[in-house]
Image (cartoon, rainbow, N blue to C red):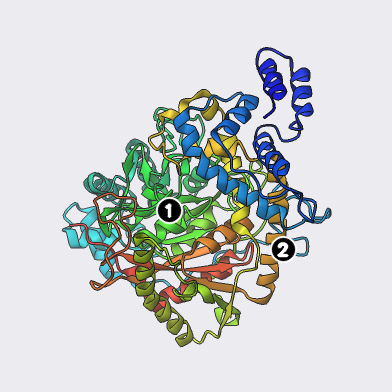
């Protein structure tokens, strides 16, 4: 930075009006990009001064970003950044610099438009808008369950009878509730009382609850019973207790977003999803934990500095950010739950906790009344014990509400008897081979341990392919399109930083428990150095990604894959639906976690913990993908295994 520029910036900081300030920035070549452009411009200009331009007209390698450059750029943005914060930011800024370079290397032609207002539906795609009645599976046999339910209703159930009810599917519970209503017997208050008791009993181990909505729940349950006994049946969710991720507003109760500084936050209206489940007769019994502000990485199961636990191994976290939703469902503490996903927040905890999750197509479920993290990536979906349960819940919450303008008028027509044998099914070949990419020569002990776990888990993937072939499925190996998906993801952080702009600028981000390099306060600060120009370029690259994924799904209907970072990134960016199902339990011979310290963020996997399988589909093919996933689930029955909590 030149002495004159330092002087000009100092003058701007000392009282120039906006027009003068912009003139100073313009003279410095920084007007269009402001803070992030200032930083990257300083780096590239410095690099350009030291080396010749590349043949394509770009500057040479970008100069290493220094704390002094951060100071200069922060001054333009009006931010105060401490020495410790700058030290934390350097690695993230380097990653951003590399992402920008990859986007620029695409040489996007002018006709590639940005994906605003975000709508992942390709022009040639025609949406099915005709709603048809849900077609449920044949009524299950529930004689044993009905007997256990009678014991629960009379308050004399032993732990075995209680567990039979607690781990029943929504489909099964709905049959029992209807049968009891026809016999003049109430069920919802008994179910609600049982699940509330289980939450109180197991939450000290699991830390899955932020707020019990007990008073509201008991009133709802009594009303549900009265309607059922009067012959008014609202559908399969009528009288079934559920839990909400605590980023959904519920009038009369705190909505804490799992974050320090928001513990007393309340809203006057219910989230649209809550209203719709109320209308379906479901009974909200708890607001469940989430990673602070929906953090969804290794630390994503930590709400208010307390880690939510995995019921299969309570020394482990449940993963995030829908931590409490997956944990409570897995532990049989709710009939079903609602989670959200921006970049893995349904997929990851469903995998860790051995439950079934359905991440719907972007724009299928309204987010009105839910905390916004990324307007172009946030999705709301169910976490349940079975695929059909997820379908029944999704059927109650999807569709336009007139408020969330991203929601399309697309139908979700559940058909449990859909002829899935007509589908073209592929699998991501490289994800089924743990040795597809060799470990680096200087691999760390953690990387080696992760590879060992992947090799062990490959047996479950091999078995899954064999099971699918046994079902008569002709599997086709494929790969994801060659798009730099990871380089597009800074848009999430930029949107999140915008969503919590005031939190950063006010300094209240210091109230969040996590203050490390990979946690929100630092991520939000780093995101402010990502330019508006580069955000738009990334959205334009996203348009290409959407087109490539749409092309892939003209060739296949369903893609089978384990949970994998790249497919999670790709499909969350393109808005495609995913169904995550349990795929077995690791044996006693499984490699132990890299760090089995109680509560460690790296304590994952190991003997007695679940593995999962994911089914991906084209946009708004949610019902079709779910029908195929249900067929696999019914063939393998892994969803019938549940943790033993004592």
Instruction: Indicate the position of residue 438 as horizontal and vertical percent values.
Output: 47, 72
**Which quarter of the figure is the N terminus placed in?**
top right
Q: Is residue 321 visible?
A: yes
Q: Is residue 330 above or below residue 470?
A: above
Residue that mark 1 sits on: 238
Name the residue furthest top.
Answer: 15
Going from N to C along the chain, the mark reached first, 2 or 1, is: 1
Instruction: Indicate the position of residue 42 as horizontal and vertical percent values.
Output: 67, 36
Image check: 117 left or right of 375? right
Q: Is residue 372 above or below residue 487?
A: above
Please report the residue visible at 51 percent of the width from the left and 38 percent of the height from the top.
89
Quadrant of the rendered image containing residue 15: top right
Please report the residue visible at 57 percent of the width from the left and 80 percent of the height from the top.
477
Instruction: Indicate the position of residue 54 as horizontal and vertical percent values.
Output: 76, 53
Q: Is residue 122 above or below residue 139?
A: above
Is 432 or 595 nearer to us in this picture?
Answer: 595
Is 2 or 421 nearer to us in this picture?
Answer: 2
Image check: 107 left or right of 304? right
Label 1: state its secondary structure: loop
Q: Residues within 10 Å of mark 2 (few under 14, many from 20)?
A: some
Q: Is residue 367 visible?
A: no
**Which quarter of the figure is the C terminus placed in?**
bottom left
Residue that mark 2 sits on: 547
Image check: 513 left or right of 618? left
Name the residue furthest right.
Answer: 111
């Amino acid at each position: 930075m030149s002495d004159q520029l330092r002087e000009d910036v100092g003058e701007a900081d000392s009282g120039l009006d906006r027009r003068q300030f912009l003139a100073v920035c313009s003279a410095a070549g920084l007007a269009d990009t402001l803070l992030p452009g200032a930083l990257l411009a300083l780096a590239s200009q410095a690099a350009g001064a030291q080396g010749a331009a590349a043949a394509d007209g770009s500057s040479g390698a970008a100069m290493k970003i220094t704390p002094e450059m951060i100071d200069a750029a922060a001054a333009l943005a009006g931010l105060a950044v401490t020495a410790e914060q700058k030290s934390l930011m350097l690695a993230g800024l380097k990653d951003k610099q590399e992402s920008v370079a990859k986007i620029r290397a695409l040489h996007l032609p002018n006709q590639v438009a940005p994906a605003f207002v975000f709508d992942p539906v390709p022009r040639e795609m025609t949406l099915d808008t005709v709603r048809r009645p849900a077609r449920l599976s044949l009524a299950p046999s529930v004689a044993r369950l009905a007997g256990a339910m009678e014991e629960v209703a009379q308050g004399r159930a032993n732990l075995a009878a209680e567990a039979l009810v607690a781990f029943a599917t929504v489909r099964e519970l709905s049959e029992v509730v209807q049968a009891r209503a026809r016999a003049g017997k109430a069920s919802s208050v008994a179910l609600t009382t049982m699940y509330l008791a289980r939450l109180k009993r197991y939450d000290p181990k699991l830390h899955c609850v932020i707020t019990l909505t007990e008073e509201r729940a008991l009133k709802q349950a009594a009303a549900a019973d009265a309607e059922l006994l009067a012959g008014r049946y609202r559908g399969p969710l009528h009288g079934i207790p559920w839990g909400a991720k605590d980023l959904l507003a519920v009038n009369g109760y705190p909505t804490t977003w799992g974050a320090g500084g928001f513990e007393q936050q309340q809203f006057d209206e219910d989230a649209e999803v809550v209203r719709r489940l109320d209308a379906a007769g479901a009974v909200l019994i708890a607001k469940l934990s989430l990673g602070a502000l929906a953090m969804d990485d290794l630390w994503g199961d930590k709400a208010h500095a307390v880690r939510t636990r995995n019921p299969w191994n309570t020394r482990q976290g449940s993963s995030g950010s829908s931590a409490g939703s997956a944990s409570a469902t897995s532990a049989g503490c709710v009939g079903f739950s609602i989670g959200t996903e921006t970049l893995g927040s349904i997929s990851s905890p469903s995998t860790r906790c051995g439950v079934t999750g359905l991440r719907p197509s972007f724009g299928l479920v309204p987010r009105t009344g839910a905390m916004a993290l990324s307007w172009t990536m946030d999705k709301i979906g169910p976490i349940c014990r079975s695929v059909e349960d997820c379908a029944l819940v999704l059927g109650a919450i999807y569709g336009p509400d007139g408020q969330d303008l991203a929601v399309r008028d697309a139908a979700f027509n559940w058909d449990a008897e859909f002829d899935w044998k007509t589908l073209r099914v592929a699998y991501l070949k490289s994800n089924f081979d743990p040795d597809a990419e060799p470990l680096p020569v200087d691999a760390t002990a953690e990387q080696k341990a992760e590879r060992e776990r992947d090799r062990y888990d490959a047996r479950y993937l091999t078995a899954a392919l064999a099971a699918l072939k046994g079902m008569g499925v002709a599997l086709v190996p494929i790969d994801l399109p060659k798009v730099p998906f990871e380089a597009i993801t800074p848009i999430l952080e930029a949107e999140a930083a915008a969503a919590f702009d005031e939190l950063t600028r006010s300094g209240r981000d210091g109230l969040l428990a996590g203050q490390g390099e990979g946690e929100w306060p630092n991520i939000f600060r780093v995101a402010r150095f990502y330019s508006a120009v580069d955000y738009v370029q990334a959205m334009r690259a996203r348009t290409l990604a959407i087109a490539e994924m749409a092309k892939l799904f003209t060739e296949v209907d369903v893609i089978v894959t384990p949970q994998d970072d790249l497919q999670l990134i790709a499909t969350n960016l393109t808005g495609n639906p995913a169904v995550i199902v349990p795929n077995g339990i690791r044996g006693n011979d499984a490699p132990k976690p890299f760090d089995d310290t109680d509560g460690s963020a790296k304590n994952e996997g190991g003997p007695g913990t679940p593995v999962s399988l994911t089914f991906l589909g084209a946009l708004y093919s949610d019902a079709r993908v779910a029908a195929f996933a249900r067929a696999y689930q019914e063939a393998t029955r892994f969803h019938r295994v549940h943790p033993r909590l004592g």
